[in-house]
Image (spheres, grey):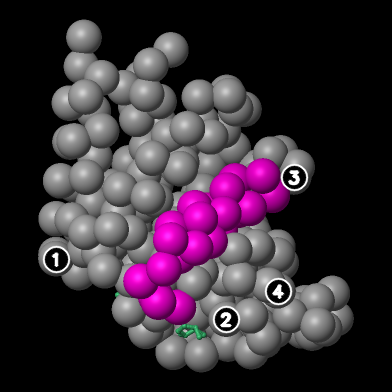
Amino acid sequence: MGLHQMTDRIELVQGDITQQETEAIGNAANSRLAGGGGVDGAIHRAGGPSLMEDLKANYPRGCPTGQAVITGGGRLKARYVLHAVGPVYSGKPKDAELLASAYRACLSLCSQHGIKTAAFPSISTGAYRYPLKEAAPIALRTVAAYLTTHPEIALVRFVLFDSATYAAYQQALEVIQGRFAS
Ligand code: APR
């Protein structure tokens, strides 16, 4: 199946990831797993203290950039939170590899844990200053490629917080779909 079919299992919405009812939601964390502002702050506020307790108990040494760890969802509707660490934008080629790796790490956690539906924020495009025009295609191509060989994942939803971010992902998705439209 071409990439076009894969994007059938990708959804874009504008909204608040803490309200999503997917089995898992992704978090844009830092390598210390210390919590923070942005979506990290929103998820910890909505999930409650059990998320940080999980992180401190299971991942005391934090998480390297480009990787992800899993905790329960606490008070969230989602059962799991995938705490991914995206790169701080530097403009070097490594940035793209690390950003793709962060999404792949979340997806492989879903496969390992039998999680079929996940929602992701736009990792690294806030405080970590990754330009949207570069990050959106990386995120979508990485997820679409993973779905190609992982039929067990039924749905990946990108939950974009503002209209500019939504528009960037919408445009990137159209480019990917257009390329494979039969
Ligand atoms: N739902 C969905 N997306 C959100 C929400 C929310 N409730 N709140 C913020 N966002 C969006 C931002 O608008 C941005 O598009 O998440 C995207 C990622 O921005 P950040 O949260 O700043 O994450 P990032 O750029 O990866 O920086 C991570 O910031 O919060 C700290 O602890 C975190 O050190 C880490 C760094």
* Ligand 1 under 8 Å from disc 2 Cβ: yes
From the image, tell me which residue sits under label 4.
Answer: 63
Q: Amino acid at mark 2?
A: Asn
Up/down of 41 relative to 132, above or below? below
Can residue 141 be seen in the rendering of this structure? yes
Q: Residues within 10 Å of mark 3 (few under 14, many from 20)?
A: few
Task: Residue at 68% x, 78% y: name it.
Answer: 51
CA gap, disc 2 to disc 3?
A: 22 Å
Q: Is residue 104 magenta?
A: yes
CA gap, disc 4 to disc 2?
A: 8 Å
Our reading of the magenta stretch's main secondary structure is: helix
Q: Quadrant of the C terminus?
A: top left
From the image, tell me which residue sits under label 1.
Answer: 164
On the picture, is 2 further left or further right than 61?
Answer: left
Q: Residue 2 in the image: x percent, y percent?
A: 38, 16
CA gap, disc 4 to disc 1?
A: 29 Å
Q: Amino acid at mark 4?
A: Cys
Name the disc covering residue 155, or none: none
Q: Residue furthest top?
A: 182
CA gap, disc 1 to disc 3?
A: 33 Å
From the image, tell me which residue sits under label 3.
Answer: 113
Task: Residue at 53% x, 34% y: name it.
Answer: 146
CA gap, disc 2 to disc 1?
A: 24 Å
- Whichever of labels 3 and 4 marks the residue nearer the N terminus, that label is 4
- Whichever of labels 2 and 1 marks the residue nearer the N terminus, that label is 2
Q: Amino acid at mark 1?
A: Ala
- Whichever of labels 1 and 3 marks the residue nearer the N terminus, that label is 3
Q: Residue 156 in the image: x percent, y percent?
A: 45, 42
Task: Residue at 24% x, 40% y: name it.
Answer: 173
The magenta span reads 88-109
Q: Residue 72 in the image: x percent, y percent?
A: 70, 65
